Image: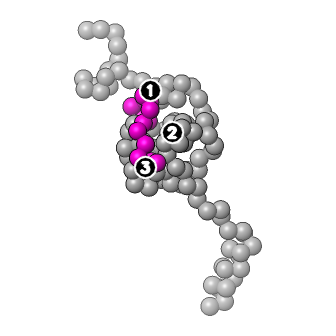
Amino acid sequence: MNDERWLDEDAGPIVPAYLLTRGRTVPASEAIDLIAVIITSGGLTPPVGLGPEHLIILQKCTKPTRLVDVAAELNLPIGVVRVLVGDLHAQQLVQVELPPPAPDAKVLLEVISGLKAL
């Protein structure tokens, strides 16, 4: 038996998640919110040289998918998926739709007061 560690016979060697991003912790394009919606840009052929995780993201995001859902489906840490999606966004292979800004706290307090008055 060799000295390599195996997850199981079919999975192959264990690869630390940070190797997927080459140690990067910040997305190439911009900060991507956890609930941002990711969608593959239509009609583009992925360039040669993308990693398998990039290709899986492109395949899973043919329909609008939230970043947290992509991370859950890939079973990867959210920080790693942010960097991978950032790579794809920088190459214009995916679109990132940011969530609308949260309403002002003053407006929320007025809504609560109005509801209490009912």
Q: Please state if 15 lies on the left or on the right of 118 as rendered.
A: left
Mark 3 or 1, which is nearer the eye?
A: 3
Q: Residue at x 72, y 69 (%)?
A: 105
Farthest top residue in view: 2
In the rendered image, which quarter is residue 111 located in? Answer: bottom right
Q: Give the CA separation, mark 2 to mark 1.
A: 12 Å
Residue 79 seen in the current view: no
The earlier-in-sequence mark between 3 and 1 is: 3
> What residue is disc 2 on?
88
- Residue 67 inside the magenta-drawn segment: no
**Residue count near mark 1 (Cα–Cα under 10 Å), binned few <14, some 14–19, many ≥20:** few
Foreground: 50 or 35?
50
Foreground: 52 or 79?
52
Q: Is residue 84 above or below residue 37?
A: above
Q: Which residues are magenta?
A: 40-54
Residue type at mark 3 is Gly
Residue 108 seen in the current view: yes
Residue type at mark 2 is Leu
List x then y, in percent, for residue 66. Answer: 48, 53
The earlier-in-sequence mark between 2 and 1 is: 1
